[in-house]
Image (spheres, rainbow, N blue to C red):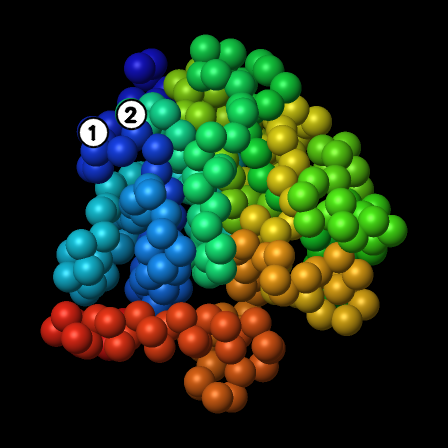
Amino acid sequence: MDSAAESVNPDATRVVDSKKVWTTLITNTSYLPGLLTLAYSLRKHSSRYPLIALYTPSFPASGHAALDARSIPKQPIPYLLPSAPKDFTNDPRFHDCWTKLVPFSLTSYDRVVQLDSDMLVLRNMDELMDLELDPPQLGGQGDKVFAASHACTCNPLKKPHYPRDWIPENCAFTTQHADPDAAQIRGAPATAGLAMPNGGLQVVNPSSATYHLISEALASPSSTSSYDFADQSLLGDLFHERWVPLPYTYNALKTMREKGVHDAIWRDDEVKNVHYILSPKPWDEEEGKESLESHKWWWKYNRERLEEEKKAGIDDGF
């Protein structure tokens, strides 16, 4: 393992027997209900692979106790930032997102599928563990460096600080409206729309050499200063056209379901993994007073989780 990987992940010991794993980043307890329900949803749908919580130094003792009580494996990672600070005043959530690049360095695993903690698995996705990608030996120089779904660049909430070219006409998913059947099984080409992956789900073959390329990009202020969307901007730029586009079903952004966004392709019974991007999160709302239909799905799974935990004697408020 080269120094680039060692510097970001000095403790590379595997924490589970499996060499293929799901991982999710956790930096504080505000996302812990999401992580715990994500873990439950993977088990509910009989995934053969473990979920590892990648925690940063800021993660508190109460969070560790919650993970330990539920026997969720955990692994320490450093908090990752570019060499030059990037102002994310309008979107503080992106400060944490650079750290989602760490899975590229976890070379003690053969396959890492990184999931955001605000996701809910609705169907088994184990096939992602066998998806064809470049072998680590190619070191980020091949045509299938990683896999992800596209970012939705419609800006449906009309956030004023988003780039001006984030409009429906420039969204990769818009290109699929004419053939919704195909959209359930194929992603739009990596070149479609603004050609940006969404960082919520990333399928990775960890590689020290690939991570070294990422480290170099993080150390280049001329690059990172222009990245409005942190990790996904970096990946879309550094590996332009050299990633495998997954259908939306693996990273179904909750906003896509809304009328006039991408309801033309969205099918509830085809979604494998829903992503609760933006605020509010389902757990920020009261059960029974959900603002979106998809939030009701999360509460159903969360209620099942809490009932299961109560029977096991776990009742810590998370």
Mark 1 or mark 2, earlier in chain: 1
Residue lying at the far bottom of the rendered structure = 288
- What amino acid type is highlighted by mark number 1? Thr
| Residue located beneath label 2 in the image | 108
Q: Residues within 10 Å of mark 2 (few under 14, many from 20)?
A: some
Task: Tell me, yes or no, whether the two marked residues, 1 and 2, touch with CB atoms within 8 Å.
Answer: yes
| Image quadrant in which the C terminus is located | bottom left
- What amino acid type is highlighted by mark number 2? Ser
Residue toward you, 70 or 185:
185
Image coordinates for residue 138, horizontal then vertical, percent = 51, 12
Dividing the picture into quarters, in which one does residue 77 lie?
Answer: top left
Which residue is rendered at x = 33% and y = 55% of the image? 43
Residue toward you, 36 or 272:
272
| Residue located beneath label 1 in the image | 13
Image coordinates for residue 187, horizontal then vertical, percent = 69, 41
Where 154 sits versus 151, above or below? below
Q: How crowded is mark 1: few (under 14 residues within 10 Å), some or many (20 or more)?
A: few
Determine whether, in the image, residue 259 is placed left or right of residue 287. right
Which residue is rendered at x = 81% and y = 68% of the image? 260
